[in-house]
Image (cartoon, rainbow, N blue to C red):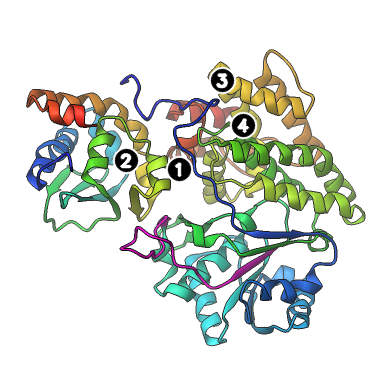
Amino acid sequence: MEAGSALDPAPLRGFKDFYQYASTTRVIAGRDLLSSTGFEFQKEGARRVFLVTDEVIRATGLVERVEAGVTDGGLEVAGVFDQVPQDSSTHVCDECAAAAKEAGADSFLAVGGGSVMDTAKVADVVFTHGGAAREQEGFYLLPRDDDGMGRPREIAPLACIPTTAGTGSEVSMAAVIKDPDERVKLEIADFPLFPRLAILDPETTRTLPAKVAAATGMDAMTHAIEGYVSVDWSAHQDARSLHALRMIRDNLERAVQRGEEDEEARGNMLIAANLAMTIALGSVHAMSHPAGAQFGVPHGVANAIHLPHVIRHNAAGSDDIADRYRDIGEIFDVSDPEIGDALATHVTELVDRLGLPTRLSQVGVPEDGIPALVEGAMGDGTTLLNPREMDEEDYAELYRAAL
Amino acid sequence: MAYFKDADEVYAYIGKLFEQLAEDDELAPKFRKANTIVQYQYREPESQITVKLIEGEDGQVDCGETTMEPEVVMTMDADTAHRFWLGKVNVTVALARGQMKAKGPVAKILKLVPLTKPVFPRYRALLEQDEREDLLKAA
C-alpha cells in the first residue's frame, strides 16, 4: 500500500480537507397540515398537481384528504397515479411521467414511503427533461448550464408527504429505482432531486402497522449511526445524526408499541428520520442492498439485522472509529471499554424488543447465498464510505455472523 | 497548464498503465469481475481510453477511437486522471465536486476503486522510468 494515498482511511476528527453539505428542502412539521397542502405547495410554484402514491395508501383514505388539501389551497389536482409497487422500477417512472404529461400537470406531490417518493423524483426528471428513467442513472449528471459545469437546471416543483418514518427520501437528493431488464438498482443523485417541500404530519403514520414502524425506524437509526461514523462525515451531518439518535431513543419504542394513540412519538419519529437522512452511509447499507435485491429482505429489517455486526467490526478497526461509536453510546447510556460489543448488544436488544428478526436465517437467507451477497456488498458504493476498509472475507464473516 | 502536452502523452502513461493491468495475472482477473466496458473521456488534452473488463474474456484497451460500446463513461480532466493514478484523488470527493462524472452503473466502477491502491506505485514507476520528474512533481 502506498503511504499517504487518497484511498487511505480518512481521519474521523479535525478539520477536513473537503466536505459538501446541502439541504434545500423546506420542511414543515406539525399537526393538521394535510389540509394546508395546497396553501404550502403554491409557494413552491405548483398549480396543477400530479399526485403519486400506491394503492395501499390510497385505500386508507389519506390520498383523498391530501387531494382536498390541495384544492382547498386553490390548486388543481391534475391526476392521481397510484400504481407504484413496493420496489418501484424504471418502467413505472416512465409511465408516471407520461401520465403526468397527459394530465397537463406542472408539479408532483408524492404521498407514500421511499418507493413512492423515489418514483416521483425520477418521473419528475423524465417529465421535465425528457428521455427515459433508465438514462438518468448517475451522480450529478442532470442537465446544467455552462456546458454541464454550471448551475443544475430545476425540475418541476416536487413536494413529499412521507407515510413512514425512516427513509428520509423527502429531504434527500437521491433516488434508487430498480431496472427490471438489467436486474440492477439504479442510483440517481443530484441537487435538483431535493424536493422543494416536505410535509411531516403524524396523521400520515397513524395506521402504520407496528412491524413497519419498527423496521422503518431502524432504517432511520441506521442512517444516523452510519452517517456519524462514515468517512464522508461532516460537522453539519454530525449535528443532525446525534440529535436524530436522541429523538429515536426517546420515541421509537413508543411509536411502535403505542402506535395510533401516541401522536407525539409518531411525529417525532418523522422528524428524526428526516434529520438522520444522509447519503454518506457505510457497510450496513452495503450489506442490506443485496439482501433486499436477492432475497427480498425489507430494507429496514436488513439494516436492523446487520447493524450490530457492522458496529462490532468497525469499532475494532481503530481508536478513532471506536471514539465515534462512544459518542453514540453516550446517547444510549452505553459506556464500556469495549464499545463495539456493548453498543452492538444494545442495538440487538432494541431490535428484539421491537419485535423484528435479528438473524438473516429468520428472513429466508440461506447460507449458500452468502457468496453472492458478498459480491453485491463489495460492489455497493457505500462500501467506500465505511470507516473501516472492507474486503470480501470481512463481508463473508459478517454475513455468517448475521445468519 | 495541463500536465500532459497531448493525447499521445496520455496514452503513453495512463494508456500504458491500463495495458499493463490487462496483462497482469493477479490483478486482471479481479478487475474483470466488474463485467463491464468502461470508457474514460479526458479533457485537456482531449483523449479517450476504453477498457474491456469482462469476466472470462481477454482484456482489451483501446486508446483513442474504439469499436467497443461502453457501459460506463467516466469524464474528467486528464490532470485529474493523472493525480488519481498517483493516489492523490479521493473518488467520492471528486464525484461530489463534479471533477469526475460517471454515467452508467457507477457501482461497478466504485467496486474497483479499492483494487487500484497497489497500482499507484506502478504508475509512479512508469513516470520514473521515463524520468518524467515534471509529471511526478506536477501533482
The chain holding disc 1 is A
| Badge 3 amino acid | Asp
Residue A402's tag is: 4
Task: Give the answer, above or below, for where A298 lies relative to A114.
Answer: above
How many neighbours does mark 2 have within 10 angstroms: few (below 14), some (14-19), or many (20 or more)?
some
N-terminal label among 1 and 4: 1
Residue in front for this viewpoint, A83 or A137: A137
Which residue type does callout 1 highlight? Gly
Mark 4 nearby-residue class (10 Å; few <14, some 14–19, many ≥20): some
- Which mark's residue is nearer the viewer, 1 or 2? 1
Q: Position of residue A43 (x, y in %)?
A: 67, 73
- Secondary structure under tag 3 reads helix
Mark closest to the chain's N terminus, 3 or 1: 3
| Quarter of the figure with residue A44 | bottom right
Q: Which residues are magenta?
A: A138-162
Q: Residue furthest front?
A: B1
Query: Can the viewer see residue A60?
Result: no
> Which residue is drawn at the image coordinates 8% and 24% (left, top)?
B131
Instruction: Indicate the position of residue A183 as horizontal and vertical percent values.
Output: 44, 57
Corner quadrant of residue B23: top left
Residue named by callout 2: B33
Q: Nearer the viewer, residue A301 or A42?
A: A42
Screen quadrant of the C terminus of chain A: top right
Secondary structure under tag 4 reads helix
Mark 2, secondary structure of its residue:
loop
Please name the residue that numbered disc 3 is placed on. A320
